[in-house]
Image (cartoon, rainbow, N blue to C red):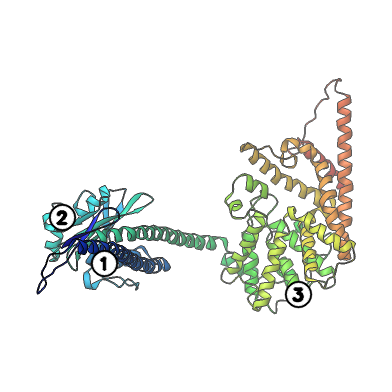
Amino acid sequence: MALPIISNVGETLGVLEFYRYGMDSSAFSEEEEDLGVSFLTWAVFGLHFAEMYHGMTKQRKLNDFLLTVTKSIFQDIVSMDTVIMKIMNYAKKLVDADRTALFLVDNRTKELYARVFDMGEEAVDAETESLPNSQKEIRFSMEVGVAGHVASTGEVLNIADAYADERFNRQVDLQTGYHTKTILCMPIYIRGSIIGVVQMVNKANGIFTSSDEESFETFAVYCGLALHHAKLYEKIRRSEQKYRVALEVLSYHSKAADDEVDKLSNMKLPDNIPCITDYDFSPWSVTNDEKPLYVIYMFRDLFSTARFDMGSLIRFTLTVRKNYRPVPYHNWSHAFSVAHAMYTVIKTTSNVFSPLESISLFVACLCHDLDHRGKTNSFMVKSASPLAAIYSTSTMEHHHFNQTVSILQNEGHNIFKSLNSDEYKQVLGDIKHCILATDLALFFGNRAKLKDLVDTDKFDWKAKEHRRHAYSIAMTSCDLVASSKPWDVQLETVHVIFEEFYAQGDAERRQGITPIAMMDREKNDELPQLEVGFLVGICLPCYELMAQILPESKPMVQGSRNNLKRWQELADSQQEQRDKKDAEKSGSHRSKTPQGHRSNTPQGQLIDNQKQDSS
């Protein structure tokens, strides 16, 4: 009796046969037939679940295999060749092939190429990183051979007899002595494009099956991702090497020259510099050649050089000088003046700051505008500067600090190398805090916090956070030190500052941006009012608050008040002239007199007139 085994979808799965022979060889009855059919109902369920279990077991093994592949390939991408070798070895294991080849697509030349080859038993193990003996890269057209067909069409080829297929190139076997029997060749995709072809040769037992095709189709997804990431890794690695070369070149050109170092090393440090601790001292009266020597003098006076290598200090100082750009205001002279201001504050405040705090404040002032481009943070953001893409807030200040760290990392420049780990960490942290504090956008918040502590009598020099608020105000005070200098120094500095501001305004106009009044050279007649606003809104509040915690700094308050008075007089005088012109609008035009090269603007007239008054 033969009964068909029918699935629930009507598909014949098999046939169950019953035999009766021997003593009782009578025919099967209808009742026995019904019993067999009833049994088959359960047999179908059994076969169905057995098939499901077999499929799940097979899928689990494939998943375990793919997990192993993923860990191996992605865990340590060393090079494209290593990834290719691992893919080839895992592909062999997956379909039990004798050899494997992986060809990458060169879309520019429409060629397939390979530079890593599976040499059978000589092939490297997938878990190692060593490669077989290197051979010359081979290339061939995508229009040639089995691999070329697959790369061109995306069609999967499962060839049971290689020599019977006209697409097979027999020349390879003739040259190598290898005999190709069966081939399974499949494309590797990434983002819908074929990036390579894997060709598996000679299945160990029989021919490649549809099951092999299905397994490798899943494996090919991981191959594509691995190759894509390996390409990205190689691009990143090449870019990194280019960056290192560029950094090496830039480092060479941005470091102080040996002859400069020798020259400064041979200079004798003065025993005393008259009036250098006075708040009225003009750093701008010191020549560029003298400034590095003065820095070394102030450094020695503040900290002694017992813990610091003099050679490193000289190289550091000269390299810092070299890394300031020749912009009108935010240049080496400005850095020197700010550092001198902090030196004066530290010297006159009776050891309020510890030695490590003092060195942090002084170095921060010296480096606080490194590589300044003469443009504000807002300009950097509006002009989509690469720096603004890196640092979304305090753009230039973050860059100044990073430049400081870069200089310290140059050989022979680390002035802090004698500090222990904790001291080094503290100094760098304080320098970063201090340089970021020079962002005027942060001044108002910093001042509000400190003022609240002072006004409520809660300010305590023993509290670390309170001391950091004091650092911030001290940095802003020193950064704006020109506003507290004698009138002739202040006037000349303002002229230089506005040269830089107007240059930015011109650049903004070229970009279709309307500059603010301070940056607009067409509104240079508003300079006195702008200076009054700046002194009243920022400088005096800053100096007055600092004088409350550091009374010795009161000369900065008085200097700013003196300058405010002069600017206010100029603003009032200018307003009187405007009122007078308005009243005479209907009168005749006044005759014009010849003017000097700078007196052809209201700003120039004011500066020239005031210089004559000062002299």
The numbered dot on residue 355 is 3
Residue 470 horizontal/vertical position (percent): 80, 65
Three-letter code, disc 1: Lys
Residue holding disc 1: 92
- If you read the primary sequence from the N terminus, does the residue marked by circle 1 or circle 2 appear first? 1
Q: Nearer the viewer, mark 3 or mark 1?
A: 1
- If you read the primary sequence from the N terminus, does the residue marked by circle 2 or circle 3 appear first? 2
Q: Which residue is painted at 65% across and 79% down in the image?
A: 420
Residue 436 horizontal/vertical position (percent): 70, 59
Residue 407 horizontal/vertical position (percent): 60, 65
Q: Is residue 87 above or below residue 568?
A: below
**Mark 2 and mark 3: span between their CA atoms?**
80 Å
**Mark 3 and mark 1: span between their CA atoms?**
68 Å
Q: Could you say which is closer to the camera, residue 257 or residue 5?
A: 5
Q: Is residue 316 left or right of residue 18?
A: right
Residue holding disc 2: 168
